[in-house]
Amino acid sequence: MPQSPSPDYRRADERAVVAGLRQREPLALAEAYHRTVPAAYACARRLLGSSDDAEVLLQTVYAELWASPPDGVGLEGWVRARCFELGADELRARGSAPASPSAMTLLPDLPAPSGSYLDAAERGLAELDERQREAILQAHDQGRPSVQQAGEDTTAAMTSALVALAGQAPAIDDGCEDLPDLADWVLGLVAPDRATQIEAAVASRPGCGALAQVLRAGRRRIEGLPITSDMGLRVLAVALTGEDGASLGRAPNEADHLLAHVAAAASAPAVVAEPLPSALDQPGDDELLAPAATTTAGATSATAATSAQDAGGSATSAGTDPSQAAPATAAAAGTPVPATTAALEAPTGATAAGAPAEAGSKPLPAPLRDELNGQGNAAVSQGETAASPATSGDGQDTARTAGGSVAAGDRNDSMAADAKPASRGLRVAGIVLGVLILIAGVALGLYIGFQVLM
Protein backbone atom coordinates (compact mmCIF):
# COMPACT_ATOMS: atom_id res chain seq x y z
CA MET A 1 0.00 0.00 0.00
CA PRO A 2 1.27 3.56 -0.67
CA GLN A 3 2.60 5.42 2.33
CA SER A 4 0.53 8.53 1.57
CA PRO A 5 -2.59 9.06 -0.57
CA SER A 6 -1.98 10.31 -4.10
CA PRO A 7 -3.23 13.85 -4.82
CA ASP A 8 -6.35 14.32 -6.91
CA TYR A 9 -5.75 16.42 -10.03
CA ARG A 10 -9.22 16.21 -11.54
CA ARG A 11 -10.22 19.71 -10.36
CA ALA A 12 -6.73 21.18 -10.22
CA ASP A 13 -5.64 23.97 -12.53
CA GLU A 14 -3.02 23.38 -15.18
CA ARG A 15 -0.21 24.74 -13.07
CA ALA A 16 -0.89 22.10 -10.41
CA VAL A 17 -1.01 19.39 -13.07
CA VAL A 18 2.37 20.46 -14.46
CA ALA A 19 3.78 20.54 -10.93
CA GLY A 20 2.50 16.99 -10.42
CA LEU A 21 4.23 15.91 -13.62
CA ARG A 22 7.49 17.33 -12.33
CA GLN A 23 7.00 15.37 -9.10
CA ARG A 24 6.53 12.17 -11.11
CA GLU A 25 2.89 11.65 -10.11
CA PRO A 26 1.21 9.14 -12.45
CA LEU A 27 -2.22 10.62 -11.72
CA ALA A 28 -0.96 13.99 -12.98
CA LEU A 29 -0.07 12.35 -16.29
CA ALA A 30 -3.50 10.71 -16.41
CA GLU A 31 -5.17 14.10 -15.93
CA ALA A 32 -2.93 15.78 -18.50
CA TYR A 33 -3.77 13.01 -20.94
CA HIS A 34 -7.50 13.39 -20.26
CA ARG A 35 -7.37 17.13 -20.98
CA THR A 36 -5.21 17.04 -24.09
CA VAL A 37 -5.85 13.73 -25.88
CA PRO A 38 -8.78 14.97 -28.03
CA ALA A 39 -6.49 17.53 -29.64
CA ALA A 40 -3.53 15.14 -29.89
CA TYR A 41 -5.56 12.33 -31.44
CA ALA A 42 -7.22 14.68 -33.94
CA CYS A 43 -3.85 16.05 -35.06
CA ALA A 44 -2.37 12.56 -35.36
CA ARG A 45 -5.30 11.23 -37.39
CA ARG A 46 -5.31 14.26 -39.70
CA LEU A 47 -1.68 13.59 -40.57
CA LEU A 48 -1.27 9.80 -40.45
CA GLY A 49 -4.82 8.57 -40.96
CA SER A 50 -4.31 5.09 -39.50
CA SER A 51 -5.38 4.58 -35.90
CA ASP A 52 -2.40 2.26 -35.33
CA ASP A 53 0.05 4.91 -36.53
CA ALA A 54 -1.75 7.53 -34.46
CA GLU A 55 -1.43 5.33 -31.36
CA VAL A 56 2.32 4.95 -31.84
CA LEU A 57 2.64 8.71 -32.27
CA LEU A 58 0.65 9.39 -29.09
CA GLN A 59 2.78 6.93 -27.14
CA THR A 60 5.88 8.86 -28.14
CA VAL A 61 4.36 12.26 -27.36
CA TYR A 62 3.07 11.35 -23.90
CA ALA A 63 6.28 9.54 -23.04
CA GLU A 64 8.07 12.83 -23.75
CA LEU A 65 5.51 14.71 -21.67
CA TRP A 66 6.11 12.29 -18.78
CA ALA A 67 9.88 12.56 -19.14
CA SER A 68 10.16 16.35 -19.43
CA PRO A 69 7.02 18.45 -18.83
CA PRO A 70 6.91 21.82 -20.64
CA ASP A 71 7.39 25.09 -18.81
CA GLY A 72 5.44 28.30 -19.40
CA VAL A 73 3.22 26.99 -22.21
CA GLY A 74 -0.15 25.32 -22.27
CA LEU A 75 -0.17 21.53 -22.19
CA GLU A 76 -2.58 21.29 -25.09
CA GLY A 77 -0.56 23.64 -27.26
CA TRP A 78 2.61 21.69 -26.50
CA VAL A 79 0.92 18.38 -27.37
CA ARG A 80 -0.41 19.79 -30.65
CA ALA A 81 3.02 21.07 -31.65
CA ARG A 82 4.79 17.78 -30.83
CA CYS A 83 2.20 15.70 -32.67
CA PHE A 84 2.59 17.86 -35.78
CA GLU A 85 6.39 17.83 -35.67
CA LEU A 86 6.70 14.07 -35.19
CA GLY A 87 3.89 13.28 -37.61
CA ALA A 88 5.36 15.49 -40.33
CA ASP A 89 8.77 13.87 -39.86
CA GLU A 90 7.18 10.44 -40.24
CA LEU A 91 5.42 11.45 -43.45
CA ARG A 92 8.65 12.87 -44.88
CA ALA A 93 10.50 9.68 -44.01
CA ARG A 94 7.85 7.64 -45.80
CA GLY A 95 7.43 10.06 -48.67
CA SER A 96 3.68 9.89 -48.06
CA ALA A 97 0.93 12.45 -48.31
CA PRO A 98 -1.03 13.60 -45.23
CA ALA A 99 -4.35 11.89 -44.68
CA SER A 100 -6.32 15.17 -44.67
CA PRO A 101 -6.17 17.32 -47.83
CA SER A 102 -6.34 20.54 -45.81
CA ALA A 103 -3.04 19.66 -44.11
CA MET A 104 -1.29 20.34 -47.43
CA THR A 105 -1.57 24.03 -46.56
CA LEU A 106 0.98 23.44 -43.78
CA LEU A 107 3.07 20.78 -45.59
CA PRO A 108 3.52 21.94 -49.20
CA ASP A 109 6.67 19.82 -49.61
CA LEU A 110 4.74 16.53 -49.30
CA PRO A 111 2.79 14.74 -52.05
CA ALA A 112 -0.86 15.64 -52.41
CA PRO A 113 -3.48 13.14 -51.21
CA SER A 114 -4.95 11.04 -54.01
CA GLY A 115 -8.43 10.56 -52.55
CA SER A 116 -11.29 12.87 -53.41
CA TYR A 117 -13.56 12.04 -50.44
CA LEU A 118 -14.04 14.86 -47.93
CA ASP A 119 -15.41 14.16 -44.47
CA ALA A 120 -17.39 16.65 -42.39
CA ALA A 121 -14.27 18.37 -41.08
CA GLU A 122 -12.74 18.76 -44.54
CA ARG A 123 -15.99 20.05 -45.99
CA GLY A 124 -16.26 22.64 -43.24
CA LEU A 125 -12.65 23.75 -43.72
CA ALA A 126 -13.16 23.98 -47.48
CA GLU A 127 -16.04 26.42 -46.96
CA LEU A 128 -13.80 28.90 -45.08
CA ASP A 129 -11.93 31.66 -46.84
CA GLU A 130 -8.18 31.32 -47.20
CA ARG A 131 -7.30 33.57 -44.24
CA GLN A 132 -9.67 31.78 -41.88
CA ARG A 133 -8.49 28.35 -43.02
CA GLU A 134 -4.81 29.21 -42.63
CA ALA A 135 -5.31 30.69 -39.16
CA ILE A 136 -7.36 27.79 -37.79
CA LEU A 137 -5.04 25.13 -39.27
CA GLN A 138 -1.94 26.72 -37.78
CA ALA A 139 -3.64 26.90 -34.41
CA HIS A 140 -5.31 23.48 -34.42
CA ASP A 141 -2.69 21.33 -36.15
CA GLN A 142 0.57 23.12 -35.33
CA GLY A 143 -0.38 24.41 -31.88
CA ARG A 144 0.57 27.96 -32.83
CA PRO A 145 -1.37 30.73 -31.01
CA SER A 146 -2.64 33.77 -32.88
CA VAL A 147 0.10 36.05 -31.56
CA GLN A 148 2.74 33.80 -33.18
CA GLN A 149 1.07 33.70 -36.58
CA ALA A 150 2.06 35.99 -39.40
CA GLY A 151 -0.46 38.39 -40.85
CA GLU A 152 -3.05 40.76 -39.50
CA ASP A 153 -6.26 40.09 -37.62
CA THR A 154 -5.32 36.48 -36.95
CA THR A 155 -7.35 36.54 -33.73
CA ALA A 156 -10.50 37.65 -35.53
CA ALA A 157 -9.85 35.12 -38.30
CA MET A 158 -9.58 32.26 -35.80
CA THR A 159 -12.75 33.32 -33.98
CA SER A 160 -14.80 33.71 -37.15
CA ALA A 161 -13.49 30.37 -38.47
CA LEU A 162 -14.62 28.47 -35.37
CA VAL A 163 -18.03 30.19 -35.44
CA ALA A 164 -18.45 29.24 -39.11
CA LEU A 165 -17.47 25.63 -38.39
CA ALA A 166 -20.00 25.50 -35.55
CA GLY A 167 -22.74 26.70 -37.88
CA GLN A 168 -24.45 28.78 -35.21
CA ALA A 169 -24.19 32.21 -33.63
CA PRO A 170 -23.81 32.84 -29.88
CA ALA A 171 -27.09 32.94 -27.97
CA ILE A 172 -26.02 36.15 -26.19
CA ASP A 173 -24.28 38.94 -28.07
CA ASP A 174 -21.40 40.08 -25.87
CA GLY A 175 -18.38 40.47 -28.14
CA CYS A 176 -15.87 39.90 -25.29
CA GLU A 177 -13.59 42.53 -26.82
CA ASP A 178 -11.40 42.44 -23.72
CA LEU A 179 -10.73 38.72 -24.36
CA PRO A 180 -9.19 38.69 -27.84
CA ASP A 181 -7.46 35.39 -27.16
CA LEU A 182 -10.68 33.53 -26.31
CA ALA A 183 -10.28 31.32 -29.40
CA ASP A 184 -6.71 30.53 -28.36
CA TRP A 185 -8.01 29.54 -24.92
CA VAL A 186 -10.63 27.23 -26.44
CA LEU A 187 -7.85 25.48 -28.39
CA GLY A 188 -5.61 25.30 -25.30
CA LEU A 189 -2.92 27.59 -26.70
CA VAL A 190 -2.52 30.12 -23.86
CA ALA A 191 -0.18 29.95 -20.89
CA PRO A 192 -1.53 28.52 -17.61
CA ASP A 193 -1.69 31.91 -15.87
CA ARG A 194 -3.64 33.49 -18.71
CA ALA A 195 -5.88 30.43 -18.95
CA THR A 196 -6.92 30.91 -15.33
CA GLN A 197 -7.91 34.53 -15.99
CA ILE A 198 -9.95 33.69 -19.09
CA GLU A 199 -11.68 30.83 -17.32
CA ALA A 200 -12.79 33.14 -14.52
CA ALA A 201 -14.11 35.71 -17.02
CA VAL A 202 -16.05 33.09 -18.98
CA ALA A 203 -17.61 31.74 -15.80
CA SER A 204 -18.73 35.20 -14.63
CA ARG A 205 -19.96 36.66 -17.94
CA PRO A 206 -22.85 34.90 -19.73
CA GLY A 207 -22.03 36.47 -23.08
CA CYS A 208 -18.45 35.21 -23.05
CA GLY A 209 -19.67 31.84 -21.87
CA ALA A 210 -22.10 31.60 -24.81
CA LEU A 211 -19.37 32.55 -27.28
CA ALA A 212 -16.97 30.01 -25.77
CA GLN A 213 -19.63 27.33 -26.16
CA VAL A 214 -19.98 28.08 -29.88
CA LEU A 215 -16.21 28.08 -30.35
CA ARG A 216 -15.99 24.66 -28.70
CA ALA A 217 -18.63 23.35 -31.11
CA GLY A 218 -16.49 24.51 -34.04
CA ARG A 219 -13.46 22.80 -32.54
CA ARG A 220 -15.34 19.51 -32.15
CA ARG A 221 -16.21 19.53 -35.85
CA ILE A 222 -12.52 19.43 -36.72
CA GLU A 223 -11.63 16.79 -34.15
CA GLY A 224 -14.10 14.14 -35.26
CA LEU A 225 -14.25 10.80 -33.45
CA PRO A 226 -12.58 10.53 -30.01
CA ILE A 227 -9.92 8.04 -29.05
CA THR A 228 -11.05 4.67 -27.70
CA SER A 229 -10.57 3.85 -24.03
CA ASP A 230 -8.42 0.77 -24.59
CA MET A 231 -6.04 2.72 -26.84
CA GLY A 232 -5.79 5.40 -24.17
CA LEU A 233 -4.86 2.83 -21.54
CA ARG A 234 -2.12 1.46 -23.75
CA VAL A 235 -0.76 4.95 -24.40
CA LEU A 236 -0.60 5.69 -20.67
CA ALA A 237 0.97 2.33 -19.88
CA VAL A 238 3.71 2.83 -22.46
CA ALA A 239 4.34 6.38 -21.26
CA LEU A 240 4.62 5.30 -17.61
CA THR A 241 6.72 2.20 -18.16
CA GLY A 242 8.76 3.29 -21.18
CA GLU A 243 12.46 4.00 -21.23
CA ASP A 244 11.97 7.75 -21.13
CA GLY A 245 10.10 7.60 -17.83
CA ALA A 246 12.33 4.92 -16.30
CA SER A 247 15.57 6.74 -17.15
CA LEU A 248 14.93 9.37 -14.49
CA GLY A 249 15.60 6.90 -11.68
CA ARG A 250 12.17 6.85 -10.03
CA ALA A 251 11.07 3.45 -8.80
CA PRO A 252 7.63 2.49 -10.12
CA ASN A 253 4.89 2.78 -7.53
CA GLU A 254 1.50 1.14 -7.18
CA ALA A 255 -0.19 3.50 -9.64
CA ASP A 256 2.31 2.57 -12.36
CA HIS A 257 1.68 -1.14 -11.90
CA LEU A 258 -2.09 -0.60 -11.77
CA LEU A 259 -2.20 1.37 -15.01
CA ALA A 260 0.04 -1.14 -16.75
CA HIS A 261 -2.13 -4.02 -15.55
CA VAL A 262 -5.34 -2.33 -16.68
CA ALA A 263 -3.85 -1.54 -20.08
CA ALA A 264 -2.70 -5.14 -20.53
CA ALA A 265 -6.15 -6.40 -19.59
CA ALA A 266 -7.82 -4.00 -22.02
CA SER A 267 -5.61 -5.06 -24.93
CA ALA A 268 -5.79 -8.81 -24.20
CA PRO A 269 -7.97 -10.91 -26.50
CA ALA A 270 -11.39 -11.80 -25.20
CA VAL A 271 -11.64 -15.24 -23.60
CA VAL A 272 -14.89 -17.12 -23.92
CA ALA A 273 -15.74 -18.48 -20.51
CA GLU A 274 -17.14 -21.93 -20.00
CA PRO A 275 -20.90 -21.85 -19.45
CA LEU A 276 -22.05 -22.24 -15.91
CA PRO A 277 -23.75 -25.54 -15.08
CA SER A 278 -27.50 -25.47 -14.98
CA ALA A 279 -29.57 -26.47 -12.00
CA LEU A 280 -30.35 -29.78 -13.72
CA ASP A 281 -26.66 -30.73 -13.58
CA GLN A 282 -26.21 -30.15 -9.86
CA PRO A 283 -25.30 -33.26 -7.82
CA GLY A 284 -27.50 -34.52 -5.03
CA ASP A 285 -26.92 -34.09 -1.33
CA ASP A 286 -25.18 -37.45 -1.09
CA GLU A 287 -22.82 -36.41 -3.88
CA LEU A 288 -21.96 -33.17 -2.11
CA LEU A 289 -21.05 -35.11 1.01
CA ALA A 290 -18.81 -37.54 -0.91
CA PRO A 291 -15.22 -36.37 -1.51
CA ALA A 292 -14.24 -35.69 -5.11
CA ALA A 293 -11.91 -38.32 -6.55
CA THR A 294 -9.13 -36.42 -8.33
CA THR A 295 -6.07 -38.05 -9.88
CA THR A 296 -2.92 -36.01 -10.58
CA ALA A 297 -0.77 -37.65 -13.24
CA GLY A 298 2.94 -37.72 -12.44
CA ALA A 299 2.63 -36.62 -8.80
CA THR A 300 5.98 -37.15 -7.05
CA SER A 301 5.35 -35.81 -3.55
CA ALA A 302 6.85 -37.85 -0.72
CA THR A 303 3.55 -38.00 1.12
CA ALA A 304 1.69 -39.54 -1.83
CA ALA A 305 4.45 -42.09 -2.42
CA THR A 306 4.58 -43.08 1.24
CA SER A 307 0.80 -43.47 1.39
CA ALA A 308 0.87 -45.65 -1.70
CA GLN A 309 3.58 -47.87 -0.20
CA ASP A 310 1.65 -48.17 3.05
CA ALA A 311 -1.44 -49.13 1.07
CA GLY A 312 0.55 -51.85 -0.70
CA GLY A 313 1.89 -53.17 2.59
CA SER A 314 -1.54 -53.20 4.14
CA ALA A 315 -2.94 -55.14 1.20
CA THR A 316 -0.17 -57.73 1.54
CA SER A 317 -0.66 -58.13 5.29
CA ALA A 318 -4.40 -58.55 4.84
CA GLY A 319 -3.88 -61.45 2.45
CA THR A 320 -4.68 -59.50 -0.69
CA ASP A 321 -2.70 -59.90 -3.88
CA PRO A 322 0.03 -57.22 -3.79
CA SER A 323 -0.48 -56.57 -7.53
CA GLN A 324 -3.79 -54.84 -6.71
CA ALA A 325 -1.93 -52.15 -4.81
CA ALA A 326 0.66 -51.71 -7.55
CA PRO A 327 -1.34 -49.23 -9.65
CA ALA A 328 -1.62 -46.77 -6.78
CA THR A 329 2.10 -46.99 -6.07
CA ALA A 330 2.95 -46.61 -9.76
CA ALA A 331 0.69 -43.57 -10.11
CA ALA A 332 2.26 -41.92 -7.07
CA ALA A 333 5.77 -42.54 -8.41
CA GLY A 334 4.92 -41.15 -11.84
CA THR A 335 5.04 -44.55 -13.62
CA PRO A 336 2.47 -45.09 -16.40
CA VAL A 337 -0.36 -47.39 -15.45
CA PRO A 338 -1.58 -49.98 -18.00
CA ALA A 339 -5.00 -49.37 -19.49
CA THR A 340 -6.35 -52.67 -18.14
CA THR A 341 -5.28 -51.80 -14.62
CA ALA A 342 -6.71 -48.29 -14.98
CA ALA A 343 -10.04 -49.76 -16.02
CA LEU A 344 -10.07 -51.99 -12.94
CA GLU A 345 -9.23 -49.01 -10.78
CA ALA A 346 -11.99 -46.85 -12.30
CA PRO A 347 -13.48 -44.29 -9.87
CA THR A 348 -16.99 -44.39 -8.54
CA GLY A 349 -18.28 -42.06 -11.31
CA ALA A 350 -17.38 -44.55 -14.09
CA THR A 351 -19.73 -45.12 -16.94
CA ALA A 352 -21.78 -48.28 -17.44
CA ALA A 353 -19.27 -49.60 -19.97
CA GLY A 354 -16.50 -49.58 -17.35
CA ALA A 355 -14.53 -46.63 -18.78
CA PRO A 356 -13.43 -43.99 -16.26
CA ALA A 357 -15.34 -40.75 -16.18
CA GLU A 358 -14.05 -37.96 -18.38
CA ALA A 359 -11.83 -35.45 -16.62
CA GLY A 360 -13.79 -32.51 -15.28
CA SER A 361 -17.17 -34.24 -15.58
CA LYS A 362 -19.56 -34.39 -12.66
CA PRO A 363 -20.33 -37.69 -10.91
CA LEU A 364 -23.73 -39.15 -11.52
CA PRO A 365 -26.23 -39.13 -8.66
CA ALA A 366 -25.90 -42.22 -6.49
CA PRO A 367 -29.24 -43.91 -7.36
CA LEU A 368 -28.73 -43.49 -11.10
CA ARG A 369 -25.09 -44.57 -10.91
CA ASP A 370 -26.01 -47.71 -8.98
CA GLU A 371 -28.75 -48.55 -11.47
CA LEU A 372 -26.40 -48.14 -14.45
CA ASN A 373 -23.63 -50.18 -12.82
CA GLY A 374 -26.03 -52.95 -11.76
CA GLN A 375 -24.88 -52.62 -8.15
CA GLY A 376 -27.89 -50.98 -6.59
CA ASN A 377 -29.92 -52.57 -3.87
CA ALA A 378 -33.31 -54.04 -4.63
CA ALA A 379 -35.38 -50.94 -4.10
CA VAL A 380 -38.74 -52.68 -3.96
CA SER A 381 -41.15 -51.16 -1.50
CA GLN A 382 -44.81 -51.58 -0.58
CA GLY A 383 -45.48 -54.79 -2.50
CA GLU A 384 -43.78 -53.74 -5.76
CA THR A 385 -42.05 -56.59 -7.57
CA ALA A 386 -38.85 -56.18 -9.56
CA ALA A 387 -38.74 -57.99 -12.89
CA SER A 388 -35.78 -59.14 -14.98
CA PRO A 389 -33.02 -59.07 -12.35
CA ALA A 390 -29.57 -58.33 -13.71
CA THR A 391 -26.38 -60.07 -12.78
CA SER A 392 -23.82 -57.83 -11.07
CA GLY A 393 -20.05 -58.01 -11.38
CA ASP A 394 -19.75 -60.40 -8.40
CA GLY A 395 -22.33 -62.86 -9.76
CA GLN A 396 -25.20 -61.85 -7.49
CA ASP A 397 -28.65 -61.01 -8.79
CA THR A 398 -29.65 -57.43 -8.07
CA ALA A 399 -32.77 -55.60 -9.09
CA ARG A 400 -32.19 -52.97 -11.79
CA THR A 401 -35.22 -51.01 -10.71
CA ALA A 402 -34.53 -47.69 -8.95
CA GLY A 403 -36.26 -46.98 -5.65
CA GLY A 404 -39.95 -46.27 -5.99
CA SER A 405 -40.28 -47.37 -9.65
CA VAL A 406 -42.81 -49.87 -11.06
CA ALA A 407 -41.48 -53.18 -12.44
CA ALA A 408 -42.02 -53.97 -16.12
CA GLY A 409 -44.59 -56.74 -15.55
CA ASP A 410 -46.62 -54.74 -13.06
CA ARG A 411 -46.50 -51.77 -15.40
CA ASN A 412 -48.03 -53.81 -18.26
CA ASP A 413 -50.78 -55.19 -15.99
CA SER A 414 -51.51 -51.73 -14.68
CA MET A 415 -51.80 -50.34 -18.20
CA ALA A 416 -54.20 -53.14 -19.20
CA ALA A 417 -56.29 -52.55 -16.10
CA ASP A 418 -56.45 -48.84 -16.79
CA ALA A 419 -57.64 -49.52 -20.37
CA LYS A 420 -60.79 -51.44 -19.22
CA PRO A 421 -62.48 -48.54 -17.37
CA ALA A 422 -61.71 -46.30 -20.32
CA SER A 423 -63.48 -48.58 -22.83
CA ARG A 424 -66.44 -49.05 -20.47
CA GLY A 425 -66.86 -45.30 -20.15
CA LEU A 426 -66.91 -44.88 -23.92
CA ARG A 427 -69.76 -47.40 -24.25
CA VAL A 428 -71.83 -45.64 -21.56
CA ALA A 429 -71.32 -42.31 -23.26
CA GLY A 430 -72.50 -43.75 -26.58
CA ILE A 431 -75.68 -45.15 -25.02
CA VAL A 432 -76.52 -41.84 -23.35
CA LEU A 433 -75.97 -39.97 -26.61
CA GLY A 434 -78.29 -42.34 -28.48
CA VAL A 435 -81.07 -41.90 -25.91
CA LEU A 436 -80.80 -38.13 -26.16
CA ILE A 437 -81.06 -38.25 -29.95
CA LEU A 438 -84.15 -40.49 -29.70
CA ILE A 439 -85.87 -38.13 -27.25
CA ALA A 440 -85.09 -35.15 -29.49
CA GLY A 441 -86.61 -36.94 -32.49
CA VAL A 442 -89.83 -37.79 -30.61
CA ALA A 443 -90.17 -34.21 -29.40
CA LEU A 444 -89.68 -32.87 -32.91
CA GLY A 445 -92.33 -35.24 -34.31
CA LEU A 446 -94.88 -34.20 -31.68
CA TYR A 447 -94.22 -30.54 -32.40
CA ILE A 448 -94.74 -30.98 -36.16
CA GLY A 449 -97.95 -32.98 -35.64
CA PHE A 450 -99.32 -30.36 -33.29
CA GLN A 451 -98.66 -27.64 -35.85
CA VAL A 452 -100.49 -29.63 -38.56
CA LEU A 453 -103.57 -30.15 -36.39
CA MET A 454 -103.74 -26.47 -35.56
Image (tube, helix red, strand yellow):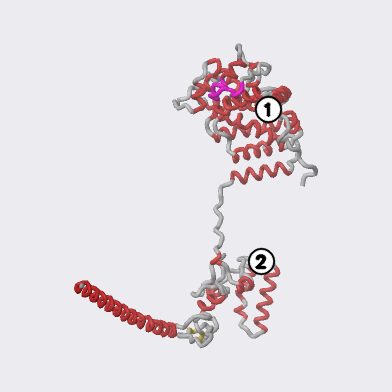
Q: Secondary structure at mark 2?
A: loop
Q: Nearer the viewer, residue 379 or 382?
A: 382
Dot 2: few (<14), some (14–19), or many (≥20) neighbours within 10 Å? some
Q: Nearer the viewer, residue 310 or 205?
A: 205
Q: Residue 93: which numbered mark, if any?
A: none
> Which kind of residue does numbered mark 1 sit on?
Leu
> Which kind of residue does numbered mark 2 sit on?
Thr
Q: Nearer the viewer, residue 294 or 419?
A: 419
Instruction: Answer yes or no: is residue 87 visible.
Output: no
Which quarter of the rendered picture does the C terminus lie within?
A: bottom left
Q: Residue at x 57, y 34 (%)?
A: 226
Residue furthest to the front in view is 454
Q: Position of residue 211 (x, y in %)?
A: 62, 23
Can you tell which of label 1 and label 2 is closer to the viewer?
Answer: 1
Q: Residue at x 73, y 30 (%)?
A: 13
Residue 80, above or below 134: below
Give the magenta part as a residue range: 161-172
Q: Identify the residue position indicated by label 2 in the image.
A: 300
Total numbered labels placed on residues in the image: 2
Q: Identify the residue position indicated by label 1 in the image.
A: 75
Q: Is residue 164 magenta?
A: yes
* Left or right of residue 224: residue 237: right
